[in-house]
Amino acid sequence: MKEKQLKYEKIVRNMTLEEKASLMSGKNFWETVNIDRLGIPSITLADGPHGIRRQAGNADHLGLNPSLRATCYPTASAMANSWDPKLGEEVGHHLGIEARSQGVHILLGPGLNMKRSPLCGRNFEYFSEDPYLAGKMASAYIRGIQEEGVASCPKHFAVNSQELRRMSTNSVVDERTLREIYLTGFEIAVKEGKPKTLMSAYNMVNGVYANENEHLLKEILTEEWGFQGVVVSDWGGSNDHVAGVIAGSHLEMPSTGMDGILEITTAVNEGRLSEQVLDQRVDELLDLIFTTDRAEKEKGKNPFDKMAHHRMAEQVAENCIVLLKNEEQLLPLKQGTQVAVVGDFAKDPRYQGAGSSMVNPTRLDHTLDLIGQSGLDCLGYAQGFHRNGEPDEKLVEEAVKLAQNAEVVLVYMGLSEQKESEGMDRKEMSLPKNQIELLRAISAVNDKVVVILSAGSVVEMSWDVEAKAIVHGYLAGQAGANAILNVLTGRVCPSGRLSETYPICYEDTPAYHYYPGKERNCEYREGLYIGYRYYDTVGIPVKYPFGYGLSYTTFAYKNLRVSRERVCLEVTNTGNVDGAEVVQIYVAKPDSRVYRPKKELKGFQKIFLRAGESAKVEIPLDDKAFRYFNGKTNRWEVEAGMYTIMAGSNVQEIHLEEEIFVEGSPVPRKEETKLPSYWSGQIQDVSDEEFERLLGHPIPDGSWKHGEDLGMNDTICQMQGAKSFLARMVFRVLDAMKKKSDKSREPNLNLLFIYHMPFRGIAKMCAGVVSMDMVRALLELVNGRYVSGVSHLFTAYCKNQRLKRGARRKQSG
């Protein structure tokens, strides 16, 4: 490969090898290394998918320590329901302003991993089960953030769909599924959003850690997509620092002390890492540092208008709320309607998820404070249930008594903080039993029930028969309470549409038999068939389909015209209320000689129409519309032939369709017998043999080697089977603490992080206090070799102290 011209060649040539190496790791938990003699400043990173989490004091990864106040916008799972990239760009713009006001140069977000299973604990932080929708929303966020001179850092690249043992799992996935489902969203975000940074995932992808995966970082991200920015490891996610730099990763976070520097300098001196490659990484990182630092100086760290941003958060939430049910047109509620308010979430709202994205809001709206201004006549409030799931007949009785006297009962239900968090996956898809029993008791005495649902991910909804209307606010941010009241009273016509499918029960989900991964492997045996791609292809009934959402008005579609480049049609608001419709374009090839889902989303547009108004809608069909990834030729191809283009309100409600012939590559030979599950879509019981044919290689052994020594990439929770009695005792203490934490309202996320962390993470997360050599010595103790372990631990400790003293002398001298 031709040597890349260095933009900052003079600075790079004047740097010592140690200085170059030092830039490849953080200075501390949230900042990069500064080199004052060369005029290289330090820049700051902060969490921020839906609000800035700049920690004010001692830093921790999962957000238990306080952060500066910032606007908490709706989470990504809510934002995707807006189907409005322009609104996403405006949110990004506001996030960029707030980041700059707090001295943040790199904002870690948005998150756009695919919602493979409803149980992923971090689904609230991701956009969709569809890569096209996720990619379009993410690229809009990125553009908005970066317009303010702040670098956006989309995450987690790639195939990161489970929180359980996330730092050591191996995502086993075939190349076609990898490209079409798990990378397409990132491809759109990189090509259209042009982020200055990108965060690699914790997990391995087909046996290679994402942060050192040349196929992902070099062949696809850089060479194929043209990414020119900086790759940042997830916190503690760097495994082999040298391999990461070679593959195209730049910055391992947080600080690893002298370990990271030694890894790089030793590799260069031994010839395992070319200094030319290191120079390129340094140059690319310097470009990020200088451009973001310069933008901050030019634009200034001006305080933002907190009230204006709060109003923006409310406007955003209004566009994200989904009306799922509205029997007898119970909604909107008329002025003066006597309502009873029931449910713990009405008093103490669920408005965001837990973990590294937890925002300390500038203010927080509460339903009980605002309902008096809504025009509704509130007769009173009853708690109804304990959000931890504990049954309480007295609370139910109080709620039922209040509900009997109301015209309409507003029941605020949802998932608690325990259920949705970084670091842990959900155990079931259902709502707590005590909430459902409360709802049934209320509907038995008053059938005019409106459920207001707060949850960042899919829940089972067999209980929906107990409600006349359901308003789903998702996790709507700090202004969500008033936004929901505006929808309930008709001040806002609901326009949110589901960005994920609501199945009838968890057993119906495509990854049911494969999620979460067992021990080390996460096997993506369902292939292309996630979300609606599965339910629609196989014909499995669902509770609420992808793209679904009701309105207070109605829309009609006509005059569909299709070409290779665009879809044109006319949409009319046929009701008597102003409102917005989301026109969704799906593409199908019924006679395909390549296995594929029944239809796939390939375009969409949200359009606002006044009552009786019509408008022409034009939606482009881009290079993603007809392609598939050919694993044999290892490239994107278009199968020549007839395609069906459909325009609809959701994946099941198609209003217009038209066929079009598309030029393409020669038609491949149909090979149904080799992969029968993937041709039929019946992927719930894929055999080892068929999955291996799909992969093109044997399934890697993902089992833990019970009875053998634990290694650097084994997890701390695996000490339950360690050879050392002391290690097993430590595990029992950790396990007891974890079980206690699981029962609390807000689980100890740092404890969960440690529980599932690989041993190498001890060094990677301790800012140099513990070196990798010290961890190796600790592993000797864990594996029962006490004498050599203690000796090596003492030697490694002394070496680490010596190196740190030497580094301090260099910095001071």
Image: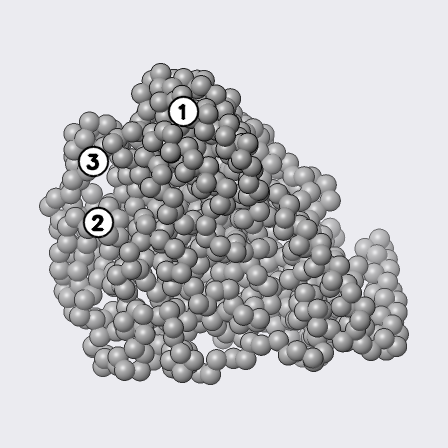
Compute the Cα span from label 1 to label 2. Answer: 38 Å
Q: Where does the image place residue 278, in percent across and percent down from the top left? A: 62, 68
Please tell me which residue is depicted at 21% across the width and 71% down the height of the picture.
Answer: 592
- Type of amino acid under label 3: Thr
Residue occupied by mark 3? 554
Is tag 2's residue or tag 3's residue first in the polypeptide sequence? Answer: 3
Residue occupied by mark 2? 653
Q: Residue 712's quadrant in the figure? A: bottom right
Q: Is residue 231 visible?
A: no
Per the image, label 2 sits on a secondary structure element best described as: loop
Residue occupied by mark 1? 404
Residues 256 and 612: in front is: 612
Whether residue 461 is situated above or below residue 514 in the rendered picture: above
Instruction: Report whether 445 appears left or right of 231.
Output: left
Q: Where does the image place residue 195, in percent across and percent down from the top left? A: 48, 53
Please tell me which residue is depicted at 26% across the width and 52% down the height of the picture.
Answer: 651
Per the image, label 1 sits on a secondary structure element best described as: helix
Compute the Cα span from label 2 to label 3. Answer: 13 Å
- Type of amino acid under label 2: Glu
- Type of amino acid under label 1: Gln
Which image quarter is the C terminus in? bottom right
Q: Where does the image place residue 264, in percent across and percent down from the top left? A: 69, 69
* Foreground label between 1 and 3: 1
Label 1 neighbour load within 10 Å: few <14, some 14-19, many 20+: some
